Image (cartoon, rainbow, N blue to C red):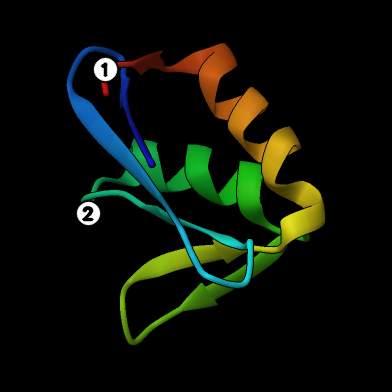
């Protein structure tokens, strides 16, 4: 769906699921984890099987807007 870069170094990747929910993945990095968790918590759940967040459909636009406000979209 989209790839964002936080602070010109750390990627945040999003993907769309058939349900309309989205996934939000980031590499292991404490700074990125804190940011992504703060955006996604209460709007979805952590999926340990795939090491990503799953954001519910009704929160997709809010989460993407918050990520775009702090990270640069590169794809």
Q: Residues within 10 Å of mark 2 (few under 14, many from 20)?
A: few
Image quadrant assignment for residue 44: bottom right
What is the quadrant of the C terminus in the image?
A: top left
Query: In the current view of this chain or complex, which residue is farthest to the bottom?
Result: 49
Q: Give percent across and percent down for residue 74.
A: 26, 17
Query: Pointer 1 and pointer 2: residues touching (CB < 8 Å)?
Result: no
Residue at 66 percent across and 39 percent down: it is 63
Marker count (numbered): 2
14 horizontally vs 45: left or right: left
Q: Residues within 10 Å of mark 1 (few under 14, many from 20)?
A: few
The residue lying toward the viewer, choosing from 24 and 41, is 24
Residue tagged 2:
28
What is the quadrant of the N terminus in the image?
A: top left
Check the image and report above or below for 4 versus 7. below
Check the image and report above or below for 9 versus 62. above
| Residue 74, label in figure | 1
Label 1 and label 2: CA atoms lie apart by: 20 Å
Residue at 31 percent across and 77 percent down: it is 50
Residue at 46 percent across and 79 percent down: it is 47
């Amino acid at each position: 769906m989209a790839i964002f870069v936080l602070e010109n170094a750390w990627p945040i990747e999003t993907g769309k699921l058939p349900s309309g929910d989205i996934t939000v993945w980031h590499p292991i990095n404490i700074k990125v984890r804190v940011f992504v968790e703060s955006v996604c918590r209460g709007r979805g759940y952590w999926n340990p099987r795939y090491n990503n967040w799953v954001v519910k459909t009704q929160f997709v636009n809010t989460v993407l807007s918050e990520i775009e406000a702090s990270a640069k979209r590169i794809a």
